[in-house]
Amino acid sequence: MSQAPSLARVGTAIRGEFPIFDTATYLNSCSQGALSVRVRDAVESWLAGWDENGAEWDFWVERNEAFRTAIARLLHASGDDVAVTTSVSQGVSGLVSALDLAGERNRIVISEYEFPTVGQIAHAQELRGAEVVHVRPDPDGSIPPERFAEAIDERTALVCCTTLSYRSGHRHDVGAIAEAAHAAGALVLADSYQACGAIELDVHSLGADAVTGGTVKYLLGTSGLGFMWVRPEVRKRLVPLQTGWFADEDIFAMSIADYSPHASARRFDAGTPPVPSLYAGVAGISLVEEAGVPAIETHVSSLVDRLLDGLDALGAGVVTPRDPRRRGPLVCIRALDVAALVSALAADRIVVSSREDKLRVALHVYNVDEDVDTLLEALARNRALLA
Ligand SMILES: Cc1ncc(COP(=O)(O)O)c(C=O)c1O
């Protein structure tokens, strides 16, 4: 490997945990993180425990709490402020269900870079009186905080600004957007699925009132598991209408006589936790924590620099911003025939993905310079397919 050995558990120091690198150049963490031996072992231990002991309820509930605590550490938050969900969709639906959208403050502002689930949930609220306002990118593809500020006023209940766009790699200035939203009395949701695990997120400085994500991508777990942090000061006035027994103030009271949501962010939990995904999620996050998100961010940033330099040399059309503060682990490249390009790369055992007419290349803790070079060589061979 061309990189110098690193003290942090990044690059060559961690790659051996991920068997896919024996046979492929994996650059698709924006879709799904690579499977590690550790995550496989964790899922197998769930099966073994089920076989040996039957219903291990106590241990399963403990895994749920281990996950909540791990997310809290990752976000520099308290576990009391973290809900465990089965998806971003569940968390966002619960959050929105707690908003009064029947009165004057009935607007939901969403960026054009939101994941479909956020836009669809926002528009679903039109059925109960909401108005949805879209914030569109400038010609250079960025959505500066001023565009949000123009769309926000005293009618705004919620502003949705994904931390990092799944389809362009743009990173929003969540802090500045939150400032404009808070000045107008609106809440801010930062869907951070494309950031958590790859970009350092501290809820104290991020500025959002709710931060959500899941374990499929840079947290190296699997599907069926997500989280939502909710600022404690605002949580108290948010009573979700979407709920379940795991959100109750006493799960095992087994009462059907009332609705008493838990005082903590647990009020945004719902039903039986996704047990296999919890085993995978806790194990995946342990790898992220061993490396440390700041070290991952630095490592990924240098890989992205290398990739951008190579793309410039090819004259490729890069959609993702150059400014390191405005980008993260995802680089999107314009293609003339993106399906053909993804297939051509797959034939070379290079795993990438696409959205619209763009090739998506995602770099993470386990990638090394050679991955970038392998991709660049393949793109040079397929230059005719790039815009
Ligand atoms: C930014 C973003 N939000 C949300 C999701 C998925 O949401 P959910 O957990 O509801 O499937 C994804 C990815 O698939 C995503 O990239």
Image (cartoon, rainbow, N blue to C red):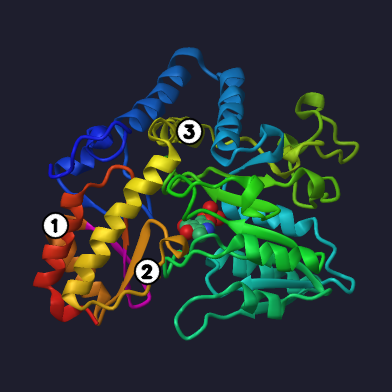
The majority secondary structure of the magenta stretch comes to strand
Mark found first going from the N terminus, 3 or 1: 3
- Determine which residue is flagged by label 2: 322
Q: Is residue 116 above or below residue 20?
A: below
Does 356 appear in magenta?
yes
Within 10 angstroms of label 1, few (less than 14), some, or many (20 or more) residues? Answer: few
Q: Which mark is residue 386?
A: none
Q: Badge 3 is on which residue?
A: 276
Q: x and y percent of residue 248 in the render? A: 79, 35
Q: Residue 270 in the image: state x and y as whole percent.
A: 69, 42
- Residue 220 shows up from this direction: no
Question: Which residue bears the numbered disc 1?
Answer: 374
Q: Residues within 10 Å of mark 2 (few under 14, many from 20)?
A: some
Q: Is residue 203 a member of the stretch shown in magenta?
A: no
* Residue stretch rendered in magenta on the structure: 351-360
Distance from label 2 to label 1 (Cα)? 22 Å
- Report the amino acid beneath label 3: Pro
Q: Nearer the viewer, mark 2 or mark 1?
A: 2
Query: Where residue 165 sits in the image (x, y, percent)?
Result: 48, 65
Above or below, comparing residue 349 to residue 106 in the picture: above
The amino acid pointed to by label 1 is Thr
